Image: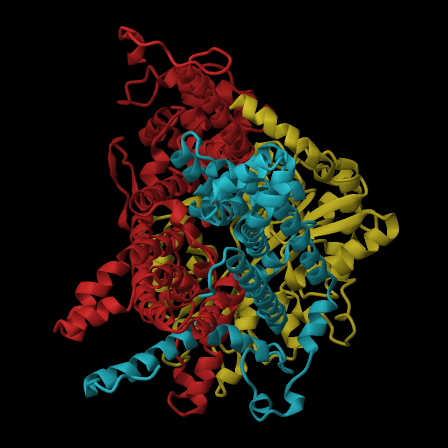
Chain colours: A yellow, B cyan, C red
Amino acid sequence: MKRLLILTASAAAIAAGAAIAQDNELIIVSWGGAYSNSQIKAYHEPYTEKTGVKILNEDKSANALAGIRSQVEAGNVTWDVVDMLQADAQRACDEGLVLEIDHDEWLAPAPDGTPASEDFIEGTLGPCFIPQILYATMFAYNTEAFPDGGPQTLEDVWDLEKFPGSRSLQQIPQKNLEWALIADGVETDQVYEVLATPEGQDRAFAKLDEIKGNVIWWTEGAQPPQMLADREVVIATAYNGRIFNAQVNEDQPFEIMWDHQMFETDGWVVPVDTGNEETIKDYLRFATDTQRLADQAKYISYGPARNSSASEVGMFEGTDIDMKPHMPTSPENLKTAIPFDVQFWADYGDSLEERFNAWVAG
Amino acid sequence: MALPAYTTTAERVWHYAFGIICALIFFFLVAPIVVIIPLSFNAQPYFTFTKEMLSFDPDGYSLRWYNALLGSNEWMSSIRNSFIISISSTVIATSLGTLAALGLNRPNMPARGIITAVLISPMIVPLIITAAALFSFFARVGLSNTFPGIILAHVVLGTPFVVLTVTASLAGFNETLIRASQSLGANQTTTFFKVILPLLLPGVIAGALFAFVTSLDEVVIVNFMAGPEQTPMTVRMFSGLREEISPTILALASLLVAMSILLLTTLELIRRRNERLRGMTPG
Amino acid sequence: MASRDRPQKQELLLAADGTPLKTALRRSQAIERRRAFMLVAPLLFFLLIVFVVPIIAMTWRSVHNPEIRDYLPQTAAALQEWDEEDVPPEPVFQGMAADMIVGVEKRTIGRAAARINREIPGARSTMMRTSREVDEWSAPYREKFLDLDEDWANLEFWRILKRESRVVTPTYYLLAVDYEYNSQGEIAPRPEVYQIYKQLFFRTAWMSLLITGLCIVLAYPISYLIATQPARTANLLLILVLLPFWTSLLVRTSAWIVLLQQQGVINEMLVALGIIDPSGRLRMIYNSTGTIVAMTHILLPFMVLPLYSVMKTIPPSYLRAAKSLGAHPFRAWWRVYFPLTVPGLAAGCILVFILAIGYYITPALVGGDSGIFISNLIADNMQGSSAQLKLASALATILLVAVLLVYWAFNKLVGVDKLKFG
């Protein structure tokens, strides 16, 4: 075995030239589609222009935690910066897969001098995590499917008689189980308490069973707007930015249902042992400053994670649409919103995902 | 095929029913592939025939999706990556596979059965298993996210086809030809190039084409192992099909259908030449 | 060799250089053998290194379980003395405290916590919270642990820790067939809501059989037709089979998406013809129907080609002879023609079946949730934030064994070298 490894290693030496990321190159992992596009426009292109560092995009954020795990375990880390959800970032941090970050040392202060650790919205910074945006996941529908008015509440989503047609939900337990409990009458502030009990879990799955026959599952953020547009489904959960882009760029007749939407933080982590730390730090300092975060909102309707960026949010690029009311953080939209519980899902994610996958395929 | 005069009515009915059944099965085989070609000229971003298309209104058709394909840096670089990977892996797989087939064909080959089984096994083992095994292994030796890694993986997948086709073309091969050549004074090298190779060539070319197509069409392994710099067109197509199905994919699909027709023609020509060489009637 | 012991009455035959002919022959045959082997050797060794070794490594990974031993070594050692009856004694907690201090320092404590959290949801938080406090404590530790969090008194937690400190574990194979260790440490079926893999193995086998069956039904008539046509027509018809065979798998799958989806060609046609209502469009894709239709189409050529190559060799006169001897046409066909096609049928069936049970791409694209195969679950366990690479390895190993069994049977019955393409 060992000798074979050595033999193969010599074959690998040929490849080594290609494997080692050059100093003036960064491999950045993100979500693809409209979201990556907003990062390219707001962060990557200006950074490349400023420094000449070439940025390569890889659309693997949906599998980022597994990817970092296997790269670190194999001792061959190729990703430089990874866009991740806060819950996954927490797990990666606990497992020692990503660098711990001194936010004030790494990140630029606000224009008025407020240090980074105080400028980011409270509760969004993690020991290994630099937040970029707050986004919401909520239900949206195609208005053409409901000439007499679309669904307004979670109960309506479950009402297959009043609102017939297929629904599309994301193929993960996160958020779906919370919504199922709320639609079943659980109070918003008790959702996670209930979901931690076996009875609560049974209850959530039973509620989802009611609509399971009418659900088409999605896995990539670009799918729900596509399915809504094709009328493959009439109601779908989606990231608010994707729906907004479809409304504005493609003139789709979509409507967002701002009821019990769940908001969550998305941001950067840096895997350990990239061997490229200086360039990465320089990039992150640039890409997470007040102006850049506000710039991103020109391309997608996600709320910047810095307080100082909020006032800088302007118009949607190339239009006269004010982005502020479309932000998931705008007070008008926040009335019934639920914050996504990162700790709960770090603890219960594995077992609920297993159960969920068995439930979906069964 | 005319029916003989003595057939009964029942046989007659069965004969025509059989013809219709076969026609339907052939339709099932070919129609799905043919249908995407006109759809790739759709002027609208839909996956179905528009009214304009059905009435053969020229406005219903356009080269829009071909322009989108050929004008996109991402698509073009992924097509280039695909060809880099397939051509390199085909060359290596063909060399290794041909040598091995020559060895297997020798009368004195030891442990022929078990070795053949090992050489063919990459074709039998499900791709997802190969992917799972190579994914971790290549990560460990630093080959993941590199061209050499993907190429080596595709060599593994391609060699069984070369071994099989070359072995098949050697099956009718007459050992005495080699002896005749040698007794006429040719050395081994001359014998190889003047006698063995021409007879072998059709098998080698067919095997190489198989290896090439296998690599060009492979999604599972590259999906796990390709980094952004190696992304081949299949991975882009795969994620495109999962996310937003744009007719751009149909444009690429139509081009691939055209390519498979080309390959098929090549193979057919090789087969005919082969049969001529062996003095068999075409059939 | 037995001949050596026999009394040698005769003079031995000698080769030109004076060695016995038998020896010379054997030597020259050995050289020939070596030469033949040298030709095969490059590919053989290449495949051993780049294919066989990685697969063996994968199989090893499916039972290799070093996390607890590596990240909580002192706890694991101290637990060996524990009687499993009561909350463990001080030495175990002492070990845990020491392991935690090292684990926080090296940032590996979360890996142990993640491993245990799979068995007991919430154990992760307990461990992480404790590990942040433990460096300020001093012996005795037991009370301090128990005061901080009552979860430390959970016997199941300690039993799992003790059990999973073995480096080689069957845990992942148990999971792969929907079994687990229960709280008493016995092997028992998992709660029903978690069961999935057994069902998927059966579904994969059953749907592959169904697809194989459909392929027989569709391939038999057209193979017969091609085999009985004059050469020119036969070649033309054969091209209709070979075209899909040579067309990219992704192209064929996208073709089926185009045809079958709710806004697709078939539904649009049915609506336009007034056969179905626009609101009653058929769901023919993103379910098991989609998988079966698309895979039957994709695998059909693998059935036609071996069948055709066998049928081509059967003289039509056999059937005529049977009929002229008075057999009913069906009886003649069943008793004379069909048995002769069995070898081709067997080759086609095993080929289609073997390819079908390992399919991934097509079910992933058109299978929705009722049409996915075990391969898709293997892929899921390689990705996603709850990925279990080891479970994926265990599932893959089981699938591999199944495939190799079929392959072995195929090799026995038909012989791999009989496989032909094009």
Residue A179 coordinates in the image, percent (x, y): 44, 62
Of B105 and B129, nearer the camera is B105
* Residue under the image location 43 percent in, 20 percent down: C26
Classify the position of the N terminus of chain C by image quarter: top left
* Residue B2 pos. (x, y %): 33, 84
A84 displayed left or right of C116: right
Residue A346 visible in rendering: no
The outermost residue toward the right is A50
Asked if residue C41 lies left or right of residue A28, the reply is: left
Residue at 42% across, 77% down: B27
Q: Nearer the viewer, residue B262 or A185?
A: B262
Count of numbered badges drawn on the protein: 0
Q: Quadrant of residue A173?
A: bottom left
Q: Is residue B10 above or below residue B246?
A: below
Q: Is residue A55 above or below residue A151?
A: above
Q: Is residue A52 left or right of residue C368?
A: right
Say which residue appears at 77% left-offset and 55% top-offset: A43
Q: Position of residue B169 (x, y in %)?
A: 49, 49
Position of residue A151 measured from the top left corner of the image (x, y, whole percent):
47, 77
Toward which corner of the image does residue A156 lie, by quadrant? bottom left
Q: Quadrant of residue C300?
A: bottom left
* Residue B106 vertical placement versus C229 (above, below): above
Residue C111 visible in the current orientation: yes
Q: Nearer the viewer, residue C144 or C77?
A: C77
